[in-house]
Image (tube, rainbow, N blue to C red):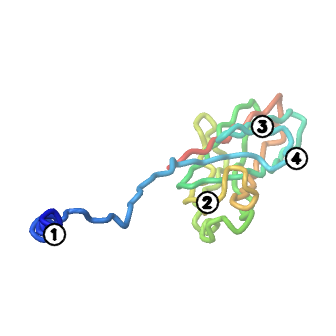
């Protein structure tokens, strides 16, 4: 009995400091990603992560359309480097369209597009920049990309040898 009274007294006079934890806060950050590829069946185009390289012969048409596919979870910028003896007369965005429901609804109107007429090809050319494209999905999801069709116009009288155009995408 004395032992029982001792335990009761300890319970009354010594406060118990155990408190249950009922919430956990987890903070994470996803690395910024921009992926650039080319639509299937694009002539002479090879993509690798955030780079697309287009190679054309000097006998190809002076007007070329390249459908680029962009996926990003952050703001992005696409630049182009032109390598050829042929003269580039125009590099512009001809068309932009979302590929599905996981594309930000504001993206098409939020793009910064500056057509390059008679551009200085000694430096990288800015093709387009904009905010986050994808609202979800992976780099292979079919419904979370933006298709940007780039128009390349070459001066016909200067068509000589191969034309190399390299597009590069990066996070802002």
Tell me which residue sits at (56%, 59%) in the image.
Answer: 132
CB atoms of marks 4 and 1 within 8 Å: no
**Count of marks placed on residues:** 4
How far, Cα to Cα, is label 4 from label 1?
82 Å
Tell me which residue sits at (78%, 43%) in the image.
Answer: 154
How far, Cα to Cα, is label 1 from label 2?
65 Å
Tell me which residue sits at (70%, 69%) in the image.
Answer: 101
Assign the N terminus to one quadrant of the image: bottom left
Give residue 165's position: percent from left, percent from top. Answer: 72, 37
Q: Earlier in the sequence, mark 3 or mark 1?
A: 1
Helix, strand or loop status at disc 4? loop
Q: Earlier in the sequence, mark 3 or mark 2?
A: 3
Tell me which residue sits at (71%, 40%) in the image.
Answer: 52
Along the line of sight, the residue nearer the viewer: 123 or 120? 123
Give residue 111's position: percent from left, percent from top. Answer: 59, 62
Q: Which image quadrant is residue 50 in?
A: top right
Q: Earlier in the sequence, mark 2 or mark 4?
A: 4
Residue behind mark 3: 46
Helix, strand or loop status at disc 2? loop
Residue behind mark 4: 41
Helix, strand or loop status at disc 3? strand
Give residue 18's position: percent from left, percent from top. Answer: 24, 62
User: Mark 4, mark 1: which one is toward the viewer?
Assistant: 1
How far, Cα to Cα, is label 3 from label 1?
79 Å
Residue behind mark 2: 133
Residues packed near mark 2 inside 10 Å, few (<14), some (14 to 19) or many (20 plus): many
Residue behind mark 1: 8
CB atoms of marks 3 and 2 within 8 Å: no
């Amino acid at each position: 009995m004395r032992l029982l009274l001792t335990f009761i007294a300890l319970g009354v006079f010594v406060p118990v400091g155990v408190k249950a934890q009922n919430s956990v806060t987890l903070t994470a950050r996803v690395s910024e990603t921009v992926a650039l590829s080319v639509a299937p069946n694009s002539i002479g185009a090879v993509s690798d992560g955030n780079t697309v390289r287009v190679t054309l012969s000097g006998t190809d048409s002076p007007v070329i359309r390249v459908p680029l596919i962009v996926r990003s979870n952050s703001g992005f910028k696409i630049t182009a480097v032109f390598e050829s003896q042929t003269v580039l007369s125009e590099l512009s965005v001809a068309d932009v369209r979302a590929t599905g429901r996981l594309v930000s609804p504001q993206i098409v109107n939020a793009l910064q597009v500056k057509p390059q007429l008679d551009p200085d090809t000694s430096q990288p050319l800015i093709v387009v920049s904009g905010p986050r494209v994808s609202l979800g999905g992976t780099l292979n999801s079919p419904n979370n990309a933006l298709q940007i069709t780039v128009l390349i116009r070459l001066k016909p009288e200067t068509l000589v040898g191969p034309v190399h155009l390299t597009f590069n995408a990066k996070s802002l």
